[in-house]
Image (tube, helix red, strand yellow):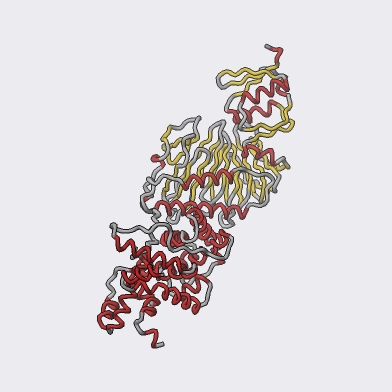
């Protein structure tokens, strides 16, 4: 034991306090004083040990310079990955596959190459970031995807909106032309919860990731109102139009969607709500999990996967029936599926899909039945050509109106 | 550069407290652990991994911590725990149980065109190259990261006495550095 107390080169090179004294530039008086009291032999050992450590350290292996911005970006990447993996754990094998995780992955990949100007050094410096720095301020209009941040504050999300991000009150917001996602940072402030509204015009769809990890695909002509509270008793959103929800599991805080005439309550599940005013009914279709659907009169029903709850306007009863789920949610992957449907029934959907107004000039056409799949990547004329050559339906496009008629009429 | 270790010593006491706070759900504590260890892990990783892999490896290390938070208990030394987890993650990534630890990565910057200094660096490089990967790693953990022998033994999963033995072997080889510079150079030329 006493051997270890001797100030030999080896002992000193093993002494953590000594190492830390050499490495830091602090004037720890203990070692300085000690050096003065050592015997000549020990003093030589002391100087040697000191010099060895300094020389090893001169390798300068700490030299790699990573900026705090880089670390910050990596941290956001981590939070996003963590909210995805927590979300994924809840997702049971699916009937169909959506491409949203891929898209999401791409969004994360983009995040890595973010511009450094946004982050100065630390989150606390970032709270002043505002949407106006990154998005175009807009008036309310029917053509753009809009994010409403407060009463009279609208921001346009366009093709050029890629790779934009900011923090606001502890929310990391990542915005791309096709999606927006909110991620909680560590210093989220819950006292003042901001209410957001997202407007998706006809002919477009948009993906949203809420702060709890819930994924929402918003269909054309739809409005979703939401907030990013992480402490409220329930997670409340309200919807006009159509959306597909993949709700992040959280037993403590149920997820509630309020539409014009329905209230859907879920814990962690996937469902589709369609509430377009031009339809005769609104509907909620469950893909996975379990939900409770209520009407405004307080009647409620538990829906099983594969079932659809329908509520016709001006009727108080909730009707539950089995439906083709794949068809209902096809729009989320950019497809529209028809199964023996009459043209008349299809028209409202097609109007939203193509952002045009179909007009049937020939009464006989209304009962034409269609079966098939429409893909988002194909444009309107592609579809009209198919109609023409397979069913003999002619068309004329005038501004935003598409007039359909049978050949010999003209 | 020299401040790194001193800085650690100052916050070492609070790191473990932060860890407990994190396990209780405090993400701010987690963030601060993340921030204060990222650069260290990054530089450590660069000694045996390519930069892109280091990034992935740190990402996975912290992701595991977040995902398996409920099964992680208190740790004695957060920094050692992180280094250990990171190492395990690296083994998975390179699909091997050996790390080719390299202390001298590429060029060592020479300061002020100092001729003598440049020479002594060449000598140092030669000495380091004679060390085994394991010796290099322990030298790094001890003299650059400020871990003590107990922590190193836990981190590497080897016995305390083994750490001591490897370290004294390495010190023996490095001892010439303590001698006068010209003397070192002489030995170098001779060998």
Task: Identify which residue, B146 or A49, lies in the foreground.
Answer: A49
Q: Position of residue B139 (x, y in %)?
A: 43, 70
- Residue drawn 44% across and 63% down? B103
Depth check: give the residue in front, A368 or A158. Answer: A158
Q: Residue at x 31, y 78 (%)?
A: A46
Q: Is residue B28 among what the camera can see?
A: no
A406 relative to B49, above or below? above
Q: Name the residue: 59% across, 60% down.
A: B95
**Figure check: B126 above or below A129:** below
Q: Position of residue A63 (x, y in %)?
A: 38, 58
Image quarter where the N terminus of chain A lies is: bottom left
Q: Position of residue A176 (x, y in %)?
A: 49, 40
The C terminus of chain A sits in image quarter: top right
Q: Residue furthest bottom?
A: A2
The number of discs equals 0
Q: Residue at x 27, y 83 (%)?
A: A40
Where is residue A29? Give x, y as percent.
27, 76
Does residue B151 show up? yes
Looking at the image, residue A82 sits to the left or right of residue B172; the answer is right
Foreground residue among A258 and A248: A248
């Amino acid at each position: 034991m006493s051997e270890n107390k001797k100030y030999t080169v080896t002992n000193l090179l093993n002494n953590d306090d000594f190492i830390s004294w050499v490495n830091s530039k602090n004037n720890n008086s203990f070692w300085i004083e000690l050096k003065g009291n050592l015997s000549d032999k020990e003093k030589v050992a002391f100087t040697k040990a000191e010099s060895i450590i300094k020389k090893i350290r001169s390798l300068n292996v700490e030299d790699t310079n990573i900026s705090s911005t880089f670390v910050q970006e990596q941290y956001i990447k981590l939070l996003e990955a963590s909210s995805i993996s927590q979300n994924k754990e809840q997702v049971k094998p699916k009937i169909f596959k959506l491409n949203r995780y891929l898209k999401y992955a791409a969004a994360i990949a983009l995040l890595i190459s973010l511009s450094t100007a946004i982050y100065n050094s630390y989150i606390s410096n970032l709270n002043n970031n505002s949407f106006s720095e990154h998005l175009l301020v807009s008036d309310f209009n029917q053509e753009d995807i809009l994010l409403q941040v407060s009463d009279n504050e609208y921001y346009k999300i366009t093709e050029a909106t890629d790779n934009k991000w900011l923090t606001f009150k502890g929310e990391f917001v990542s915005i791309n032309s096709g999606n927006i996602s909110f991620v909680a940072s560590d210093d989220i402030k819950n006292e003042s919860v901001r209410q957001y509204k997202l407007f998706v015009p006809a002919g477009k769809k948009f993906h949203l990731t809420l702060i709890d990890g819930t994924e929402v695909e918003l269909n054309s002509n739809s409005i979703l109102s939401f907030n990013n509270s992480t402490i409220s008793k329930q997670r409340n959103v309200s919807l006009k139009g159509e959306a597909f929800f993949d709700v992040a599991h959280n037993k403590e805080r149920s997820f509630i969607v309020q539409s014009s005439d329905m209230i859907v309550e879920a814990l962690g599940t996937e469902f589709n709500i369609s509430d377009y005013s031009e339809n005769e009914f609104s509907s909620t279709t469950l893909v996975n999990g379990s939900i409770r659907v209520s009407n405004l009169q307080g009647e409620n029903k538990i829906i099983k996967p594969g079932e659809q709850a329908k509520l016709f306007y001006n009727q108080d009863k909730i009707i539950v029936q089995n439906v083709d789920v794949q068809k209902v949610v096809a729009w989320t992957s950019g497809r529209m599926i028809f199964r023996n449907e009459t043209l008349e029934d299809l028209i409202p959907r097609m109007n939203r899909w193509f952002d045009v107004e179909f007009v049937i000039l020939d009464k006989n056409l209304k009962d034409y039945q269609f079966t098939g799949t429409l893909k988002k990547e194909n444009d309107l004329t592609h579809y009209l050509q198919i109609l023409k050559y397979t069913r003999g339906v002619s068309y004329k496009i005038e501004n935003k109106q598409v007039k359909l008629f049978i050949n010999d009429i003209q | 550069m020299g401040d790194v270790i001193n800085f650690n010593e100052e916050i070492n006491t609070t790191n473990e407290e932060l860890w407990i706070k994190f396990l209780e759900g405090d993400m701010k504590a987690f963030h601060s652990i993340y921030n204060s260890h990222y650069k260290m892990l990054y530089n450590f990783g660069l000694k045996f991994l390519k930069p892109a892999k280091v990034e992935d490896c740190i990402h996975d290390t912290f992701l595991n911590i977040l995902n398996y938070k409920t099964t992680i208990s208190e740790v004695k030394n957060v920094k050692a725990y992180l280094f250990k987890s990171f190492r395990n993650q690296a083994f998975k990534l390179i699909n091997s149980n050996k790390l080719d630890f390299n202390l001298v990565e590429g060029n060592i910057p020479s300061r002020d065109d100092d001729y003598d200094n440049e020479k002594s660096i060449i000598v140092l490089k030669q000495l380091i190259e004679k060390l085994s990967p394991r010796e290099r790693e322990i030298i790094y953990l001890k003299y650059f990261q400020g871990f003590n022998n107990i922590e190193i033994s836990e981190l590497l999963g080897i016995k305390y006495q083994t750490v001591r033995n490897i370290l004294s072997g390495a010190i023996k080889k490095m001892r010439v550095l303590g001698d006068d510079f010209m003397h070192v150079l002489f030995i170098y030329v001779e060998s």
